[in-house]
Image: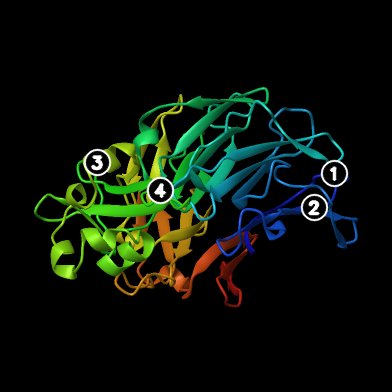
Amino acid sequence: SEDAESVFFDGDNDGDMDLYVCSGGTEFSQSSSALKDRYYINDGNGVFTLSNQFLPSTAGYVSSSTVSAGDVDGDGDMDLFVGERMKLLNYGVAGSGFLLKNDGSGKFEVSPTSGFENIGMITSSKLLDLDGDQNLDLVLTGEFLGVLFFKNDGGVFTRVEGPMDQLTGWWRAIATADVDGDGDQDLIVGNHGLNSRFRASAEQPIRLYFDDYDNNGFIDPIITGYAEDGKEYPYALRHNLIDQIKSFKKRFPDYETYKNAPIQEIFTSEELAASTILDVKTLETSVLINEGDFKFKVVALPVEAQLSPMFAIKTGDFDKDGDQDIIMGGNLYGAKPEVGRYDASYGVYLENDGQGNFTAIKDGRGFRVDGEVRDIIVNGEEIIISRNSETLVKFKIQ
């Protein structure tokens, strides 16, 4: 499996930092023990021992993608939220979230009343107090998902529905900070960006249709987009579609019969009616300004933040003028040739004017990093960048 995300936190209440690691990826089946998340207990001297707990859930293995730590029930110990990336071999089927309550000694159990079942393909989460009631609320997002909010009332979470549910995207990351200086927490959310062949809007969204169209026991996902003629076409080439759904070779015997077929001609009306349909309405990496009562104003970040998918975002007063600036990074190399790899970003440094308006600094003031950025850590005057299959990069703030 792959280490999808991790968090240091004091799990057993002994004053030192323990470690939780999400195990994810698509290389293993749902029955593989390689997908078990790992919880390492620190003995206080920096020696970590792997706990034998079955995490995040004893109900079975999951491909987890995100973990957030915080005392959600106010009992003095650290609890966890873990999000499921996808159902393996069934892209599109909603994954679940797991609220792991701590008994105070570092033993975790899934809360039976968490309400996070079958949310979607979760990629990122944050526990933070969004409404000022001293309880840690939850924000999460993912692929073909909006930005979802859950209000915490003494450890019981309730979904807060609103316009952000419809802000569906290919979301990758969430960061939090008071960017407009009004005392509450705003959100910075990383999306796919605008520098690709993909286009999405509320009127002409990217859509994901899925069902077991050939009745072989596996989900067949089909992604579509709108062309200039206003029709909705699949992105898959004919041979890709037939590799997935063998029976369609009779329906489309050659490329000529397939090339101009919109989605309504590829599937029958009965097949479309039986499909689950998800959508993406925005691809912009954005700031969500908190206006209170779980209401947010969406502000797209400058074009420099839209050049590639953004996977890592951190905030801080990097120019020492009293407000919160943003650094971020991304890129994605493992894309199909007909789409092309996403490698246009060399990191982004955005300075805040104090009102939550951001300007990209062209030279980055020295912040420049290539590769597939997957995490950013700000530790005092140091910035540490982790990259997929690459060495760490370190910057010093001066």
Is 322 drawn above or below residue 2 in the view shown? above
Q: Residue at x 57, y 47 (%)?
A: 84
Q: Residue at x 59, y 50 (%)?
A: 66
Asked if residue 226 shows in the view, the reply is yes
Q: Spatial distance from mark 4 to mark 1, Cα to Cα?
A: 44 Å
Q: Which mark is residue 12?
A: 1
Please give the residue where the numbered disc 2 appears in the rendered image. Answer: 18
- Quarter of the figure with the N terminus: bottom right
What crowding class fits label 4: few (fewer than 14 Cα within 10 Å), some (14-19), or many (20 or more)? some
Measured from the top left, where is residue 219 in percent x and y? 44, 50
Q: Residue at x 31, y 69 (%)?
A: 339
Q: Residue furthest left?
A: 229
Dot 4 or dot 2: first in sequence order is 2
- The mark lying in front, picked from 4 and 1, is 4
Q: Which mark is residue 202?
A: 3
Measured from the top left, where is residue 357 in percent x and y? 35, 48
Coloration mode: rainbow
> Do the residues under discs 3 and 1 have CB atoms within 8 angstroms?
no
Three-letter amino acid code at disc 4?
Answer: Asp
What crowding class fits label 2: few (fewer than 14 Cα within 10 Å), some (14-19), or many (20 or more)? many
Is 6 drawn above or below residue 391 in the view shown? above
Question: SS class of the residue under badge 3?
Answer: loop
Q: Which mark is residue 212?
A: 4
Dot 4 or dot 3: first in sequence order is 3
Three-letter amino acid code at disc 3?
Answer: Ala
Measured from the top left, where is residue 367 in percent x and y? 47, 70
What crowding class fits label 1: few (fewer than 14 Cα within 10 Å), some (14-19), or many (20 or more)? some
Three-letter amino acid code at disc 2?
Answer: Asp
Asked if residue 356 shows in the view, the reply is no
What crowding class fits label 3: few (fewer than 14 Cα within 10 Å), some (14-19), or many (20 or more)? few
Q: Spatial distance from mark 3 to mark 2, Cα to Cα?
A: 43 Å
- The mark lying in front, picked from 3 and 1, is 3
